Amino acid sequence: MKRMSLLLALVALLGAGTAPTRTANPIALMNYLPGTWTCSTTFGGGALTYQARYAYDQNQTWLTAIDTSKMGTDRLMISYDKAKHRFRALVADSGGGITVFEAPDTGLAHIVYKSVFPDATMQETFDRISDMHYTTHFRQHTDKGLVTVTDDCRKKA
């Protein structure tokens, strides 16, 4: 679940609102994200800390993050579909699972992702607080009830 939080974090920078007119790939505008972040996550009475390392890939058309915790290592990859004005995020988790998220382009400070694969039960909201701080809020409806996860991430200076 922390993997999904990363993807949301990757997609925030400017302001919220209606879909902005893009003159550049918004992934390249997320220049505050590359580097190392320390994240505290809370979920169902539990908590853990993990490191998120962000970097650009493929001429700044992709932003990748590698999450490392005592539970394993996950990878997040984010891109932007200019034709459809949508962010796309792929999360490959340490258990061998893959999740694909999409989010409409409503700005880069508040991004709401919804899962499209393997199902449509997940939502993750990314909120950029500053260049050094972001939060994510994950929700998933399962047969056992609602799962929620909150991450608070701060960049190492």
Image: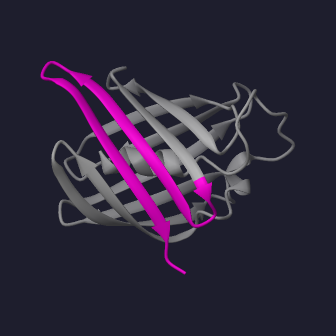
Seen at 28% across and 36% down, the residue is: 148
Residue visible at 55% across and 81% down in the picture: 157
**Based on the displayed image, in which of its 4 quarters is residue 72 positioned?**
bottom left
Residue 129 placement: quadrant = bottom right
Q: Nearer the viewer, residue 110 or 83?
A: 110
Nearest the viewer among 20 and 26 is 20
Could you say where residue 107 lies in the image, as x and y percent from the top left?
Answer: 70, 38
**In this view, 56 is above or below 142:** below
Q: Residue 55: give x, y in percent of width and height.
A: 55, 66
Q: Is residue 88 left or right of residue 114?
A: right
In the rendered image, the quadrant that contains the N terminus is: top left
Is 55 positioned to the left or the right of 2 in the image?
right
Question: Height in image: 118 above or below 44?
Answer: above
Per the rendered image, the range of residues in magenta is: 129-157
The residue drawn where x is 63% and y is 64% is 131
Residue 141 shown in magenta? yes
Q: Give the percent coordinates (x, y) of residue 149.
A: 30, 42
The x and y percentages for residue 57 are 59, 60
